[in-house]
Amino acid sequence: MAGKGEVLTVERLRAVLDYDPASGVFRWRVDTGKKRLAGTVAGCSTKTGHAVIGIDGRLYLAHRLAWMWVNGQWPAEEIDHRNGDPSDNRITNLREASHAQNMRNSSIRSHNTTGFKGVHFYKRTGAWTAKVTAGGRQHFLGYFRSAQDAHAAYVAAAVRVHGEFHRVR
């Protein structure tokens, strides 16, 4: 049994949890406490919507455990949720990603007032602008008459520079 300071192994993970790749749900294989009975769903949600599971006194993000369960090793990089839903831990929704790739797949910011990712209203000219970030730099895409036109430019650029990791909303 792993102690608090020991690294979780795939053998230990599989000994205490069952994982259903189709649903993304973990269930306890064995009783590990009063509320952790064999067959019950493991873990709880964080404020950000990610599932966390406590094993041997340490908390683990469920999407990282799912990756380890299926692939037999701890992920080398971050794990990205393809559909942007942090509670969806189906293995088909998970992929390894660099931090930059993971950020490209992020949703529109909560403080965005335009309703479109990558679009801003430039008060000085009364025009809409679009920018895309690539290689750690923002790239200006031009001035546009409408937010929709600016967003279309952003979408085209995001698909081109971010590939499969682009997210337009």
Image (spheres, rainbow, N blue to C red):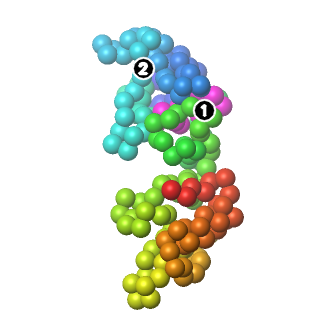
Residue 68 inside the magenta-drawn segment: yes
Residue at the image point whose x is 59% and y is 25% from the top = 22
- 144 is higher (above) or lower (below) than 102: below
Residue 62 inside the magenta-drawn segment: yes
Which residue in the structure is indicated by mark 2? Answer: 41
**Residue 68 shows up from this direction:** no
Q: Position of residue 142 (x, y in %)?
A: 57, 81
**Residue 36 shows up from this direction:** yes
Front residue of this view, candidates 41 and 53: 41
Residue at the image point whose x is 35% and y is 39% from the top = 46
Residue at the image point whose x is 38% and y is 44% from the top = 48
- 24 is higher (above) or lower (below) than 105: above
Within the image, what quadrant is residue 59 found in? Answer: top left
Report the magenta stretch's main SS. Answer: helix
**Label disc, if present, on residue 91 of the rendered structure:** 1
- In the displayed structure image, the side of residue 39 where residue 138 appears, left or right: right
- In the displayed structure image, the side of residue 1 where residue 34 appears, left or right: left
Q: Which residues are magenta?
A: 61-71
Residue at the image point whose x is 47% and y is 82% from the top = 127
Q: Earlier in the sequence, mark 2 or mark 1?
A: 2
Within the image, what quadrant is residue 10 found in? Answer: top right
Q: Position of residue 27 (x, y in %)?
A: 47, 18
Front residue of this view, candidates 112 and 25: 112
Q: Position of residue 64 (x, y in %)?
A: 53, 36
Q: Amino acid at mark 1?
A: Ile
